[in-house]
Image: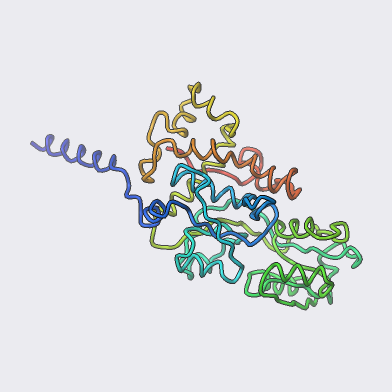
Amino acid sequence: MHARLLAGLVAGLLALAAIPALAGQTLDAVRQNGVVRCGVPTAVAGMARPDSRGRWVGLHADICRAVAAAALGDAEKVRFVPVTAQSRFTALQSGEVDLLVYVTALTLARDATMGLSQVAPYFYTGQGFLVRRSLNVGHASELDGATVCSTQGSIVERNLADFAQRARIRLTTIAYDTQANVVAAFIAGRCDAISNDMISLSANRLSAPDPDAFILLPELISKEPQGALVRNGDAEWAVLVRWSIFALIQAEEFGLTRENVVATRASTADPEIRRFLGLSENVGAGLGLRDDWAFQIVRQVGDYGTLYETHAGARGLGLERGLNRLWNQGGLMMSWLWQ
């Protein structure tokens, strides 16, 4: 009798484990709306901005598309909502957007006190300085007495104060409400330098009327892992967004690209790749998704390495890959296990 009871209990637990997870309220709303509403910067080259045809391009834009490919099966079902450094968190907290893919550092305060969840890092960078070449400085420690324009209410101001104290130099910070106004003030000569993450500074330099008039200083004054954010209270949506980012990273590790994933799916015998592409197991069951959701991300959007080189690397901002290499190539990019 005890053996039969134990067998029945085990069978019941296995049956429960096989039940797909509920989709969650955000995914339900996304499906009802027919789009993923994605909060992005107003215009940051290499990350998110409309091209000449009005199509949003950049690494942030493609991460939004990866989430749409997973959630809706169509990477183009995204409504891009431009937000500022001041409005980005409110837009997410209020439900105006479903996720935030912005140039946003992952910090303790943002994780613990804002009602938001930081789901996964997708870019490792740091805060630096863009200065006028005519200033004749080659290192951040030579900025004593300089004026620095920065975005009001951002972590940039705190990092500047911390750096000035450590380096024992004096910096005067001039704050503006938007990054666009920061850059405009800098180009107009109202300050000697601007400080931000290296993504933004590289984009600012390239978009300047005379990029050669400005130089990036080599030092980083802070580390800055950047990642996507969602609202607290919907764990299922947070998991979906996290694993959509992981799918891009894992695709690169497997050598899967937009160009080869269809042929690979038809021919591969590799058990890990078959699992990833949904051929041998329903890896989407726990997310409330179809079994081919990761395949759709790669087929419609691509892999992390290609996106990096296109938008941030040699074909984009010109940033070295550095810490954004895969874990097995000396970097920090690593997906969790597809098991």
User: Which of the pair 288/36 is nearer the observer?
Assistant: 36
- In the rendered view, tell whether residue 16 sits above or below residue 41: above
- Is 199 on the left-hand or right-hand side of 187? left
**What is the residue that sits farthest to the left in this orientation?**
1
Q: Is residue 180 left or right of residue 328?
A: right
Q: Residue drawn 65% across and 47% down?
A: 324
Residue 86 point in image, percent of width and height: 59, 71
Residue 38 percent coordinates (x, y) = 52, 57
Which image quadrant: the C terminus?
top left
**Quadrant location, the N terminus:** top left
Question: In the image, 27: left or right of 132?
Answer: left
Residue 23 percent location from the top left of the image: 35, 50
Image quarter of residue 159 = bottom right
Q: Of 103 and 218, which appears nearest the observer?
A: 103
Q: Looking at the image, what colour scheme do you see? A: rainbow
Count the labels in the image.
0
Residue drawn at 53 percent across, 28 percent down: 262
Coordinates of residue 222 in the picture (x, y in percent): 68, 63
Residue 142 lies left or right of residue 44; in this view the side is: right
